[in-house]
Amino acid sequence: MIMNEELNMKIRHLRIFKIVCEEESITKAAEKLFMTQPAVSNAINELENHLGVNLFDRISRRIYLNETGKLFLEKAIKLLNQYDDLEQNIKELEDNATIKIGSSITIANFILPEVIVDFEKIYNNTPTKVIVGNARKIEEMLYNNEIDLGLIEGAIYNEELIKIPFSSYKLAIIGSPKHKLASEEPIGIDELIRERLLLREEGSAIRDVFDSALLLHNLRVNPEWTSINSQALIYAVKQNLGISILPRILVEKEIDSNEIFEIKVNDLELINVNHIVFHKNKFQTRGFKALIEIIKDKVNDN
């Protein structure tokens, strides 16, 4: 606050100085500025004291801009023009500021590309930068102010972050049609965890949902495969190497074409909630707010 007041005071002094130079009179400058003559004189004296030089010669009760003052006036005019330009174009600068987005993988696959296309139609001068990673990594980047906005699947653990649910998706337990559990009859959870499991890495929202559901039954798993790549797990399932848990929207085509079989498990419904996430102290530009609304609208449209 003190810095802002000091900055405003100096800009104000420069403006007064410029008018005094133009009018070549304290009295005329005071009339133009709607100020008292002593207030204008004080401002000039404060400026000279601050600079440690005299800008005017005071002769026979008149002031004359001296050579130092003339050189200073040239620089003051340039500075005032730059400051005025900055004030007038601050909204344009805000619109040109890059919005850094962190997204969980499933959201990046199925929601984010269309969101970015819609956003760029309206804010075509606002660049976006996208980083795709697992939920915990995105959450950490938000907290460290490395990104502005996060699109995260699953639970948000940091209390400094604001989270807005905007959609959800089901997870499917999948295996090869050749797998011994590929039957219309549901199986028990105990039977599921005895199988060879091919899972996403710890820290991913998909893995968090599955592990949390198992904890409700006092169960844990030690997967034989762990991967950050869902496509690698899908291919392994097709080769009948084990069972995986992945977003159903990711494998719907394979399920419909009977390349993959969806296994039903009693008392195990896995749903991931998607959140718009940002730090509670984050300054929200117009583009930032618009992007959030586009995400909400895109999901509602679908």
Image (cartoon, rainbow, N blue to C red):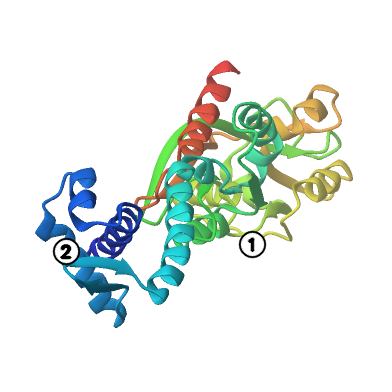
Q: Residues within 10 Å of mark 1 (few under 14, many from 20)?
A: few
Contact, mark 1 vs mark 2 (Cβ under 8 Å) = no
Comparing 169 with 108, the one in front is: 108
Q: Position of residue 148 (x, y in %)?
A: 51, 51
Comparing 125 with 88, the one in front is: 88
Question: The N terminus lies in which quarter of the figure?
Answer: bottom left
Q: Is residue 122 left or right of residue 32?
A: right
The amino acid pointed to by label 2 is Ser
Vertically, is 82 above or below 271?
below
Q: Is residue 229 visible?
A: yes
Foreground label between 1 and 2: 2
Q: Which residue is mark 1?
A: 222
Q: Position of residue 123 (x, y in %)?
A: 60, 32
Task: Identify the disc placed on residue 130.
Answer: none
Comparing 65 with 225, the one in front is: 65
Disc 2 secondary structure class: helix
Q: Earlier in the sequence, mark 1 or mark 2?
A: 2
The amino acid pointed to by label 1 is Asn
Residue drawn 35% across the image and 53% down it: 22
Q: Which residue is mark 2?
A: 41
Vertically, is 287 above or below 70?
above
Residue drawn 65% across the image and 33% down it: 124
Q: What is the residue that sits farthest to the right in this orientation?
A: 239
Disc 1 secondary structure class: loop
Q: Residues within 10 Å of mark 2 (few under 14, many from 20)?
A: some
Q: Position of residue 282 (x, y in %)?
A: 40, 51
Q: Position of residue 139 (x, y in %)?
A: 50, 56
